Amino acid sequence: MSARTPTAGATTLLVIAKEPVPGRVKTRLTPPFSPGEAAELATAALEDTLRTVLTLPALRRVLVLEGRPGPWMPQGFDVLPQSAGTLDERIAAAFGTCDGPALLVGMDTPQITPALLAPALSPGGWDACDAWFGPAEDGGFWALGLAAPDPSLVRGVPMSRPGTGTIQRARLTGAGLTVRDLPPLRDVDTAEDALHVAAEAPHGLFASALSRLDRAEVR
């Protein structure tokens, strides 16, 4: 049920994130990491994500932020505050700010690369396609793209559960949308996840930050 195919670079890229404040981000990394170390890893993950998004073709790049921008914030992004409410409501509100095709990612997958997102952002990425879906290995999702952003496609989906991704994808197909899938990725939630993701992207800031910490604590 795709409408007119958008041209290359016509997609708004959304990054939904929290300000990396100790005690408020990556709390499942504590222990073995201290709240400060967990925030350091969160900062690196967010920086990696934003740097990658800057390299992608886009109509507009938007950081949908809970908190305030810090020195980790590069130029090239508009900043919008997250709305109040549960995560589904905040994601829905972010899509509601977009007039055309939009693709949203979070800050938990610093291993994303331009190649991973290229199918959705190529000149034919929205050809006969209404939605792009990137499943996460923990049962959630790491990317969601909508050719015609409709907040109702997200609002009410229970988040942070093992079945979140299945429910969200079913919401899309149940609305009659043609959905294409991106490769599954692993979120950084636990120390084990951190080691896995750093190994996948060994040259990123996240891997560098992890190497500065005592890795013996997470083995």
Image (cartoon, rainbow, N blue to C red):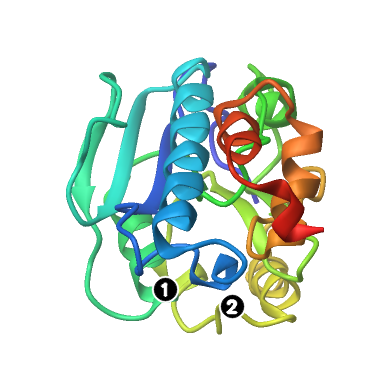
Q: Is residue 192 left or right of residue 102?
A: right
Q: Earlier in the sequence, mark 2 or mark 1?
A: 1
Image location (x, y in percent) of residue 143 = 61, 49
| Quadrant of image for the C terminus | bottom right
Residue 152: name its quadrant.
bottom left
Percent position of residue 199, x then y: 80, 36
Residue beneath disc 2: 160
User: Is 179 drawn above or below residue 2 in the view shown?
Assistant: below
Residue flagged by tag 2: what amino acid is it? Ser
Counting other residues with Cα less than 10 Å from the Cα at mark 2, is it few (<14), some (14-19), or many (20 or more)? some
Q: Secondary structure at mark 1?
A: helix
Vertical side of 10 occupied by 153: above or below: below
**Residue at mark 2 to residue at mark 1: CA–CA distance:** 9 Å
Camera-nearest residue between 137 and 128:
137
Question: How would you rate the neighbour count of disc 1 (Cα within 10 Å): few for under 14, some for 14-19, many for 20 or more?
Answer: some
121, 150: nearer the viewer: 121
- Quadrant for residue 58, please give it: top left
Residue at figure coordinates x 63%, y 70% from the top left:
175
In this view of the protein, can residue 103 be seen by the observer? no
- Which residue is at a point 58% across and 71% down the rendered structure image? 31
Q: Which residue is mark 1?
A: 87
Q: Is residue 9 visible?
A: yes
Q: Is residue 101 left or right of residue 183?
A: left
The disc placed on residue 13 is none
**Which residue is pictured at 69% across the width and 42% down the height?**
129
Q: Secondary structure at mark 2?
A: loop
Q: Amino acid at mark 1?
A: Leu
Verify CB contact (< 8 Å) between mark 2 and mark 1. Answer: yes
Q: How many marks?
A: 2
Residue 82 in picture, x, y percent from top left:
25, 60
Rendered location of residue 35, percent (x, y): 42, 64
